[in-house]
């Protein structure tokens, strides 16, 4: 798995053409794949407007629109050039689309019928700011997205974003989702592009295989298939994974609840939460009934060998204690350390407490405490530095583009999620999901990247298929949609 520069992508396409693949065949497959990805994301048909330039990127959008029309969507086209200026293939695909409105007025707003704008203005061959008349069409798309509202989906790459560097030029299209065709383009994974790419997913084409070239990989639905095997029919709670959680403190008991919920919804057979005996009565009334709660007077009472995986830190508070550090030393099973657990080991000096089977889940501030000097550096570079310093550990660096890294393995940039996840408790839920996958036998690196995708996809589903919105989305909503996210990834 990996990503390519635009020049490398063109070379890959040329090799396919030399093997007898036609540009039209690729366009048909790409458009069909784009349409299928859109249909999976919208439970009800709506209106789709293909906003196109003169090149083959616009052809992809027109093919996608045709498949969406077959699925019951209302279809329209917007373009600023003369029809005669369209390339040969886009002109053919426009004819095949049949009669449809061109540059028509927007439909009346209906919250139950999505309005989708397909960005087919420019492809990977473009460079620099958009020029007239595409600049005006891009501005119309951005204005419509902001005011109507509409969802903008970029074909392969958002117009006005550099495919190699991720540089965003003036007037670039702001996409909510980028469906990158064949192989992810290197610039899409750069932090600079995140506010214009939105979520990301690859449209897989057998003719354009993803190379294993050591470059950053996109974490999407295709990359997580098969990471969690289907269960045998005789699976029982004892062999479905036992998770132990140390989380919560006065004023932050909700973190323990969310972490336990994530572990339960993630599939763990048995989940046990440890809490200070003084806080036991308060947490007992909050915890899901499926979880077990164990009061402890000292952390020495916890036996890590009773579990298949453990999670430490959510809402734990930063009060340092030698018993916490001693507990980490005693844990030999896979371990997730989050939040205040990270802050505690940062104070003690992380070198002695980051083990072979650990997954660390810091946000940038926590990483700066663990790894001084990281502030201001490129996130991918920082992730590589960290895992090189702590080989065997897996880093999940949170952000709008969560990065998952482990020395000697491909680095992943997660493509799922939305701005609704900018709320408290999301990391607690994620920690629980990671721990559940570890307890079920998934390797640390795979568990981290799978969990990041699952939680991000659940956030998307809570809005597209549920009743949430970006402002209203809560961490607790993630657990309600993990089942659907699992099913999409091939787990029944």
Image: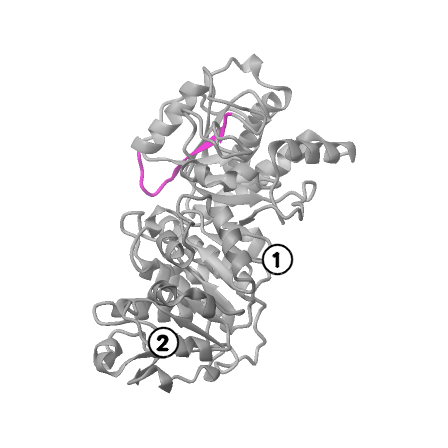
Q: Which colour assignment does the render follow?
A: one colour
**Residue 132, above or below 436:** above
Residue corresponding to mark 2: 324
Q: CA distance from mark 2 to mark 1?
A: 30 Å
Q: Which residues are magenta?
A: 109-121
**Residue that appears at 54% across and 61% down:** 445
Mark 2 or mark 1, earlier in chain: 2
**Residue that appears at 65% across and 45% down:** 210
Is residue 342 rendered to the left or right of residue 333? left
Q: What SS does tag 2 mark?
A: helix
Q: What SS does tag 1 mark?
A: loop
Front-most of 302 and 422?
302
Residue 423's quadrant in the figure?
bottom left
Question: Residue 118 in magenta?
Answer: yes
Front-most of 251 and 375?
375
**Residue that appears at 37% across and 29% down:** 142
Total residue callouts: 2
**Residue 492, above or below 197:** below
Residue 490's quadrant in the figure?
bottom right
**Residue 431, above or below 107:** below
Position of residue 254 measured from the top left corner of the image (x, y, whole percent): 27, 67
Question: Residue 141 in magenta?
Answer: no
Q: Residues within 10 Å of mark 2 (few under 14, many from 20)?
A: many
Front-most of 284 and 77?
284
Q: Residues within 10 Å of mark 1 (few under 14, many from 20)?
A: few
Residue 491 in view here? no
Tell me, for residue 408, which label it has, or none: 1
Is residue 462 rendered to the left or right of residue 87? left
Position of residue 83 measured from the top left corner of the image (x, y, whole percent): 54, 15
Residue 230 in view here? yes
């Amino acid at each position: 798995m990996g990503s390519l520069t635009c020049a490398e992508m063109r070379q890959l396409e040329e090799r396919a053409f030399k093997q007898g693949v036609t540009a039209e065949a690729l366009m048909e497959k790409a458009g069909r794949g784009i349409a299928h990805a859109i249909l999976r994301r919208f439970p009800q048909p709506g209106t789709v407007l293909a906003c196109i330039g003169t090149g083959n990127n616009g052809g992809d959008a027109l093919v996608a629109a045709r498949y969406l029309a077959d699925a019951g969507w209302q279809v329209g086209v917007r373009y600023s050039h003369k029809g005669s200026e369209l390339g040969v293939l886009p002109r053919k695909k426009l004819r095949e689309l049949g009669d449809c409105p061109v540059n028509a007025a927007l439909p009346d707003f209906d919250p139950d019928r999505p309005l989708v704008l397909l960005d087919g203005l420019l492809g990977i061959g473009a460079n620099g700011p958009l020029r007239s008349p595409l600049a005006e069409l891009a501005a119309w798309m951005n204005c419509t997205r902001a005011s109507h509202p509409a969802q903008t989906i970029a074909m392969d790459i958002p117009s006005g974003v550099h495919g190699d560097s991720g540089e965003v030029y003036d007037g670039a299209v702001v996409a909510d989702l980028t469906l990158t065709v064949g192989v992810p383009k290197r610039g899409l994974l750069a932090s600079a592009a995140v506010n214009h790419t939105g979520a990301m997913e690859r449209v897989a084409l057998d003719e354009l295989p993803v190379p294993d070239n050591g470059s950053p990989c996109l974490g999407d639905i295709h990359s997580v298939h098969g990471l969690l095997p289907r269960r045998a029919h005789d699976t029982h709670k004892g062999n479905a994974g036992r998770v132990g959680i140390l989380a919560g403190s006065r004023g932050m008991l909700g973190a323990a609840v969310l972490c336990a919920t994530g572990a339960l919804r993630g599939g763990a057979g048995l989940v046990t939460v440890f809490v200070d005996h003084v806080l036991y009565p308060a947490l007992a009334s909050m915890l899901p009934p499926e979880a077990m709660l164990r009061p402890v007077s000292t952390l020495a009472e916890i036996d890590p060998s009773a579990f298949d995986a453990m999670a430490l830190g959510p809402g734990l508070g930063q009060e340092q204690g030698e018993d916490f550090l001693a507990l980490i030393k005693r844990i030999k099973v896979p371990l997730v350390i989050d939040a205040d657990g990270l802050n505690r080991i940062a104070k003690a000096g992380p070198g002695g407490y980051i083990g072979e089977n650990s997954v660390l889940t810091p946000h940038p501030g926590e990483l700066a405490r663990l790894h001084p000097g990281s502030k201001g550096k490129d996130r991918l570079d920082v992730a590589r530095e960290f895992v090189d310093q702590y080989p065997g550990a897996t880093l999940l660096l949170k952000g709008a583009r969560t990065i998952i890294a482990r020395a000697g393995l491909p680095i992943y940039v997660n493509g799922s999620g939305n701005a609704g996840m900018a709320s408290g408790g999301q990391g607690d839920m994620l920690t629980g999901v990671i721990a559940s996958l570890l307890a079920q036998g998934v390797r640390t690196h795979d568990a981290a990247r799978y969990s990041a995708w699952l939680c991000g996809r659940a956030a998307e589903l809570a809005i597209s298929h549920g009743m949430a919105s970006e402002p209203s989305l809560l961490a607790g909503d993630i657990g309600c949609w993990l089942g659907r996210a699992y099913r999409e990834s091939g787990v029944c």
